[in-house]
Image (tube, rainbow, N blue to C red):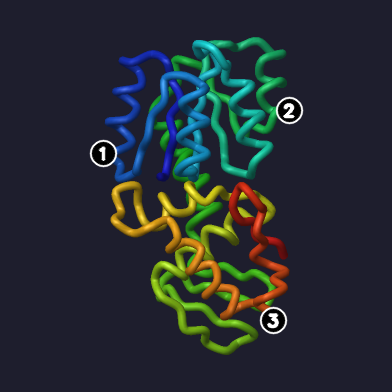
């Protein structure tokens, strides 16, 4: 998904969701911290809009957990305006902190800025690999590597989240879709194929690492 909104005010949640979907973003929503983390761990997100005052687990705890797992951008949207709250949010890893009521146009500008800086490049370079996001092609040390669309998306997701453990469920649901009729074993097969294409020794991979009982992690 593009954006995960975590907000317990149903009216505000609906308005923000409708607005962002009208702008073309793929949006998921959660009204509490526990559901937010479940959605994030299962599907991931390219950006999180996070309220602080949530039932149960508050936004600070959600922010800390998400930041411990990766570098997904986080914007806190909250009525808590004290200096201490702002500092706490930023120290825990939030990228920005907006006070309620916020200007929707300013929020949209911030979102567009994050997406432009983080995701608008037409190429990703990682070591001797270059991924062309326009043609969905890959080269290794300047030589073309034949790759299917699913292999490309899987490689791209791993590299974009390097150093972060991506669970098998999250990878499968993101690449094949939750309603896919493919078997989860398909992911294991694609990981094997990717290793054969990009690792110097596929049997002793140094980039696509298996984290037993959890999933996979990309290392430089």
Write down the quadrant of residue 197 in the picture.
bottom right
Residue 190, label in figure: none
The reply, left or right, for residue 37 in relation to residue 95 is left
Q: Secondary structure at mark 3?
A: loop
Q: Secondary structure at mark 1?
A: helix
Note whether 123 is above or below 103 in the view shown: below
Q: Which residue is mark 2?
A: 91
Gap in angstroms between the C-alphas marked 3 and 1: 45 Å
- Residue 108: which quarter of the image? top left
Q: CA distance from mark 2 to mark 3?
A: 40 Å
The first of marks 3 and 1 along the sequence is 1
Which residue matches tag 3? 200
Residue 61 image position (x, y, % from top left):
63, 22
Question: Considering the image in quadrants, where does the C terminus appear?
Answer: bottom right
User: Badge 3 local density, few (<14 within 10 Å), some, or many (20+)?
Assistant: few
Residue toward you, 51 or 184: 184
Question: Is residue 204 toward the left or the right of residue 9 in the image?
Answer: right
Q: Residue at x 43, y 29 (%)?
A: 5
For label 1, the residue is 22
Residue plotted at (47% across, 84% down): 146
User: Closest to the observer: 185 or 158?
Assistant: 185
């Amino acid at each position: 998904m593009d954006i995960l909104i975590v907000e317990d005010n149903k009216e505000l949640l609906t308005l923000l969701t409708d607005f962002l979907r009208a702008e073309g973003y793929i949006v998921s929503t959660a009204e509490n911290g526990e559901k937010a983390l479940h959605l994030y761990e299962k599907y991931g997100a390219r950006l999180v809009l996070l309220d602080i005052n949530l039932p149960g687990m508050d936004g600070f705890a959600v922010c800390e957990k998400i930041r411990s797992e990766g570098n997904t951008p986080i914007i806190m949207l909250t009525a808590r305006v004290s200096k201490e709250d702002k500092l706490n949010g930023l120290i825990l890893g939030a990228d920005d902190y907006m006070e309620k009521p916020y200007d929707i146009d300013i929020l949209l500008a911030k979102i567009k800025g994050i997406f432009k800086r983080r995701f608008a490049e037409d190429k990703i370079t990682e070591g001797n690999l270059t991924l062309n996001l326009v043609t969905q092609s890959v080269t290794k040390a300047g030589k073309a590597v034949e790759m299917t669309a699913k292999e490309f998306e899987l490689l791209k997701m791993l590299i974009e989240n390097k150093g972060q453990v991506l669970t098998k469920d999250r990878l499968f649901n993101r690449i094949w879709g939750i309603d896919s009729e493919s078997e989860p074993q398909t992911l294991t097969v694609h990981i094997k194929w990717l290793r054969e294409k990009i690792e110097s020794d596929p049997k002793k991979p140094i980039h696509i690492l298996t984290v037993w009982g959890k999933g996979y992690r990309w290392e430089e």
